[in-house]
Amino acid sequence: MLTLGIETSCDDTSVALLEGARHLRRFLVASQLEDHEAFGGVVPELASRKHLENFLPLLSRLLTECEIKNPSREIHLIAVTDGPGLMGSLLIGTTAAKALAQVWEVPLITVNHLEGHIFANYLAHDDLFPPFITLIVSGGHTELILVRSFGDYVLLGATRDDAIGEAFDKIARLLGLGYPGGPAIEKAARGGDPAAVALPVPMADSPDIEFSFSGLKTAVIWASKRNPYLRLEDLCASFQHAATEALVCKVELAVRKTGIRKVAVSGGVAANLELRRKMKGVPWKTYFPPIELCTDNGAMIAAAGYNAYKRGERASLSFMPDPSKSL
Ligand code: KG4
Ligand code: ZN
């Protein structure tokens, strides 16, 4: 059974073909990084226009490369992200999915973007079964979720203010490192001393599972203003250390509170090598997707959609995307 996965919730247009539950035939991503770089972040209006331009060429490339000659016979299911995300961006993907489902006469499944990130790990690890804890860390989310079973999720805690990826992006912009900030800061931090600047590990003393990155962002900016001779690599390494430490600290708390010793990390920030290194030295089992499945992609949406289809879910052609959809 072949599932077409469609993801357009933010600034990446992505399509994928998945065979059965886990066999990924191919996934393609049309990145808009260059379009948004000059603005230092995603411009929603520009993002939806770019999705519109990119979608059909990307889909026809996918079908050609996978040698799909008759999609209405060969593709059995369409899975599309319907939120959370940017309304204009979501509308492009969901409208395309509705049209294709109608023309090809195949069933349609809507996928919560966060559930998609959970399924990036499912795709990569066939030994990952619920219950497990998942940490979603991206430009829009910092959430710890208990996966009781697929389709049954309990929010354990989230950020009070900025998402961790947002903090990476904002700090990089203020330091003139460009967009996206995560990879730029990671690169700039190489060779830096993570103990050079004493930055607070956010929420470390709180007994609750919650995050906060806004104060850390301010502390980084102040440190750079107060000491103009501070080496960039030291400042970036110190920030990266404090930010990733906050994640490890709250994952540890979630493991203690739930007694569940399996943790799957996903989302764009899961590509960070310092975070991956830290999560190796812990007394619980940690899963990461391959780097290319950390950021937004249609493969994880296809996998989540196929699973939901097998659970009996279906979407009608009249659904509307929900920019603030929760799990
Ligand atoms: O999951 P994603 O592609 O989109 C959202 O759903 O937000 O994540 C993008 C975020 C951006 O904030 C980006 O700066 C961050 O992930 N990111 C990283 C790294 N690669 C991407 N953050 C830290 N280190 C990285 N290597
Ligand atoms: Zn995402």
Image (cartoon, rainbow, N blue to C red):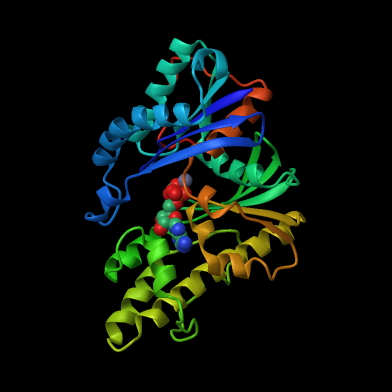
Q: Looking at this view, name the residue that lies furthest to the left.
A: 38
Left/right placement of residue 266 relative to residue 84 reads right
45 w.r.t. 308: above or below:
below
- Corner quadrant of residue 12: top left
Depth check, front residue: 163 or 20: 20
Percent of width and height locating residue 292: 51, 50
112 w.r.t. 192: above or below:
above
Left/right placement of residue 284 relative to residue 175 reads right
2 w.r.t. 104: above or below:
below
Count how many numbered circles sit on residues in the image: 0
Asked if one can make out residue 203 in the rendered structure from this viewpoint, the answer is no
Name the residue rendered at 53%, 37% in the picture: 26
Asked if one can make out residue 137 in the rendered structure from this viewpoint, the answer is yes
Percent of width and height locating residue 259: 77, 56
Depth check, front residue: 102 or 30: 30
Name the residue rendered at 51%, 22% in the picture: 68
- Corner quadrant of residue 275: bottom right
Percent of width and height locating residue 59: 41, 28
Percent of width and height locating residue 297: 48, 41
Depth check, front residue: 249 or 127: 127
Name the residue rendered at 43%, 15% in the picture: 318
Q: Quadrant of the C terminus?
A: top right
144 w.r.t. 197: above or below:
above
Q: Quadrant of the N terminus?
A: top right
